[in-house]
Amino acid sequence: MKISKKSKPYMKSKPQKKKAQLKADQAAILAITSGDVMKDLESRKNDKDSRTMYIRFPGKLLPQTVDEIKELHSEIKFVRTPRIASKQKAGIGYAFIEFEGSEECKAAKDILATTQFKDSEV
């Protein structure tokens, strides 16, 4: 019994990967298995930690926006804040401030230790 072409399902074959893509995949697998990816990730994390500072705002007059926090120091590169619930609109109680480098972070720590935000020390 012969099967006609119409009764056979038409199956496409997957397109072949290009040589450059295959080499890139092999390099990525090698980097993951040798631990290079984790070393790179850890070094970037340590670098970020050395230039980041935790800052807390005591008192009842808290900053409402990230821009108010950036006004505390001119070299602030990035500010990370917690999410604020819609019911609680008191303001931002703490933030993580990121600087360009670890030296700027250390210098800003001394300056921010004596800085006041709305009549209370930071």
Image (cartoon, rainbow, N blue to C red):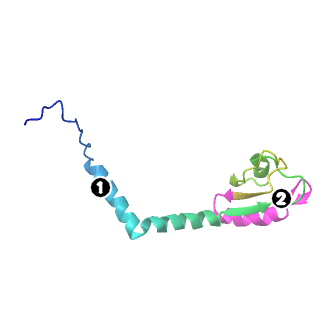
Residue 64: x, y in percent? 81, 47
Q: Residues within 10 Å of mark 2 (few under 14, many from 20)?
A: many
Q: Which residue is the extreme one toward the left?
A: 1
Q: Residues within 10 Å of mark 1 (few under 14, many from 20)?
A: few
Quadrant of the rendering where the N terminus is positioned: top left
Quadrant of the rendering where the C terminus is positioned: bottom right
Circle 2: element type: loop
Q: Which residue is the extreme one toward the right?
A: 119
| Image marks 2 and 1: residues in contact by CB distance under 8 Å | no
Circle 1: element type: helix
Q: Which residue is the extreme one toward the top?
A: 6
Q: Amino acid at mark 1?
A: Lys
Which one is nearer the viewer's eye here, 41 or 117? 41
Residue 53: x, y in percent? 71, 63
Residue 58 placement: quadrant: bottom right
Write down the residue under mark 2. 57
Residue 8 placement: quadrant: top left
Residue 97: x, y in percent? 71, 58
Question: Is residue 119 rendered magenta in the image?
Answer: yes
Range of magenta residues: 98-122
Which one is nearer the viewer's eye here, 24 or 68? 24
Specify which label sits upstream in the sequence, 2 or 1: 1
Question: Is residue 28 rendered magenta in the image?
Answer: no
The residue sitting at 71% across, 55% down in the picture is 75
Q: Is residue 11 above or below residue 43?
A: above
The residue sitting at 38% across, 64% down in the picture is 31
Write down the residue under mark 1. 23
The residue sitting at 75% across, 48% down in the picture is 66
Q: Which mark is residue 95?
A: none
What is the C-alpha distance between the residues marked 2 and 1? 51 Å
Q: Amino acid at mark 2?
A: Phe
Q: How many marks?
A: 2
